[in-house]
Amino acid sequence: MSLTKIRCPECDAALKSDDGFTVGEEVTCPKCDTTFAVPKPKAKAVLAEAADEPDQPKTKKKKAASADEPRSYKDSPLRYAILGVLVLVMIVLGVLLYLKKGTVEAEAANNDPPQNAPQQPVQPQPLPKFPPFPVPKQPNPKQPGKQAGKQPSGGGGLGGALVGGIDPLAPVFGSAPSAAQGKQIVAKYGAALVGSWVCEADGSTDEVAYLGDGTFVASRTGTGAAKAGGKYTVVGPAGATGLKLKLETDTGTRTITVSFDGDALEHPTLEKGVTATFKRK
């Protein structure tokens, strides 16, 4: 017997086939994958009614789980225990962060000065004091007895300024240095003084040589030619870069002042009243 419509005994779904179903034929339901044998129809009226009614799938009842079946992870007590531990850890971390924040704020409050506290004025620091440097004088072409590149100094005696009285340039060296500074200046520039020095200007050449045995020789060639010589002694410092020298010659004893400017030496010449810049020979 061939049937064109049957129902699945499991999900009650209506199955149709243009070729028809044979009673006893095994059919697999496409909805619930249930394989069953086509039953023998009970009555034509029932089939006709089933053909006219729309397909209404029945709700499949869920079987109650038996006591022997294993529980899923969702219903497991282990899941709730793990969640409880995580919640407890989060609470502890929150408490620790809160306590740490309070400690940092307390330390910041202790370190910050009060807003109404008066601010201490900043005391200016004094500038370091340096020994004064010699100020060279510029030659005055309008006054007689001065040559270009030379400066007036104490004169008189043998040949002029070299063996004259106390050099009038001494006051420009500033205040006297301390005893310790004076020893350093004498030691430094006393050693630098030893050697030969020369100055050429206005057709004349001045030379002076200080020897390590305490003697000196001075000469001038050209205009106002002259010579001098004898013993010299470093009396003391003259400012920060100068020396006071005592010169002993056949005509007497005189004191002059010399000063160093880098590699140059400001020194009186044998021309009366003139000081010039000497270079090391």
Image (spheres, helix red, strand yellow):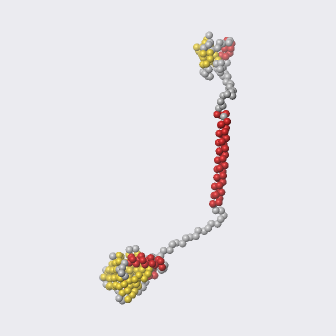
Quick one: 7 or 108, which is closer to the camera? 108
- Left or right of 209? Residue 113 is right
199 w.r.t. 98: above or below: below
Expressed as whole percent of the image width and height from the top left, the position of residue 54 reads 66, 20
Asked whether the viewer can see residue 81, the reply is: yes
Query: In the rendered image, which quarter is residue 140 located in?
Result: bottom left
Regarding residue 161, the answer to whether it shows in the image is: no
Q: Position of residue 77 (x, y in %)?
A: 67, 36
Viewer-closest of 167 and 249: 249
Q: In the image, is 127 to the left or to the right of 8? A: left
> Picture quarter containing residue 256?
bottom left
Q: Residue at x 64, y 58 (%)?
A: 107
Observer-nearest of 41 and 153: 41
Report the side of 268 relative to 109 (left or right). left
Q: Residue 23, image x and y in percent?
A: 62, 12
Expressed as whole percent of the image width and height from the top left, the position of residue 72 reads 65, 32
Residue at the image position 67 percent from the left and 24 percent from the top? 60
Is 142 on the left-hand or right-hand side of 175?
Answer: left
Residue 202: image quadrant is bottom left
Which residue corresponds to the image point at 64% horizontal and 66% vertical from the top-left?
118
Q: Which image quadrant: the N terminus?
A: top right
Residue furthest to the bottom: 251
Give above or below for 143 relative to 66: below
Q: Quarter holding the C terminus?
A: bottom left
Q: Which residue is depicted at the point 61% across and 21% down?
A: 33
Q: How many marks?
A: 0
Q: Residue furthest front?
A: 68
Which residue is farthest left?
222
